[in-house]
Image: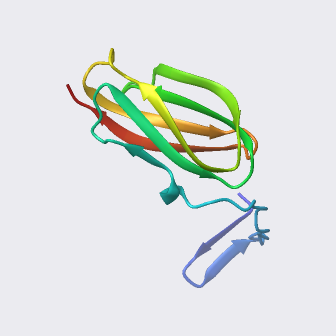
Amino acid sequence: MIGYRKGAETWGQTPRLTCRPLATIASRPAATTAAFPNPFGSELSVAFILVHSQTVALTLHDGLGRAVLARPAAPLPAGQQQVALPTAGLPVGVYSLHLRFVGEGRTEVLRVVKTQ
């Protein structure tokens, strides 16, 4: 133990920590990504906006975290995008949709529900 403080008493030396802000990249807010309809049935559509052209991958995970549906990473142009995922064979339940923006090293997760 380097130092200890109890009330007004101090033993040893307590180190001072310096904090540096993390570098960030310009990105869009998560609110611009939407999955619809939610709850979904035989098809799930995902809409999002790309600031610049980049590679995007989509993966749908079940409640246990297993990948049940994947759209391989593909380059998409900048602007408004909409991708349809066929989900007819999936059982009813809660799923998480992971959008991985490869050019930005960022992933967004949306919760969606499957019905009949």
Q: How is the image coloured?
A: rainbow
In the image, residue 29 lies at what x, y percent? 56, 61
Please name whichever residue, 4 or 46, is drawn nearer the observer in this view of the structure.
46
The residue positioned 22% from the left and 29% from the top of the image is: 115
The residue positioned 79% from the left and 71% from the top of the image is: 18
Judge left or right: residue 25 versus residue 4: right
Q: Quadrant of the N terminus?
A: bottom right
Please name whichever residue, 60 or 23, is drawn nearer the observer in this view of the structure.
60
Q: Quadrant of the C terminus?
A: top left
Furthest toward the top, the residue is 89
Furthest toward the bottom, the residue is 8
In the image, residue 108 lies at what x, y percent? 55, 45
In the image, residue 90 lies at what x, y percent? 33, 18
The residue positioned 54% from the left and 81% from the top of the image is: 7
Judge left or right: residue 28 versus residue 83: right
The residue positioned 39% from the left and 25% from the top of the image is: 62
In the image, residue 77 lies at what x, y percent? 71, 43
Relative height, residue 71 to residue 96 (above, below): above
Judge left or right: residue 41 versus residue 60: left
Judge left or right: residue 25 versus residue 48: right
Total numbered circles: 0
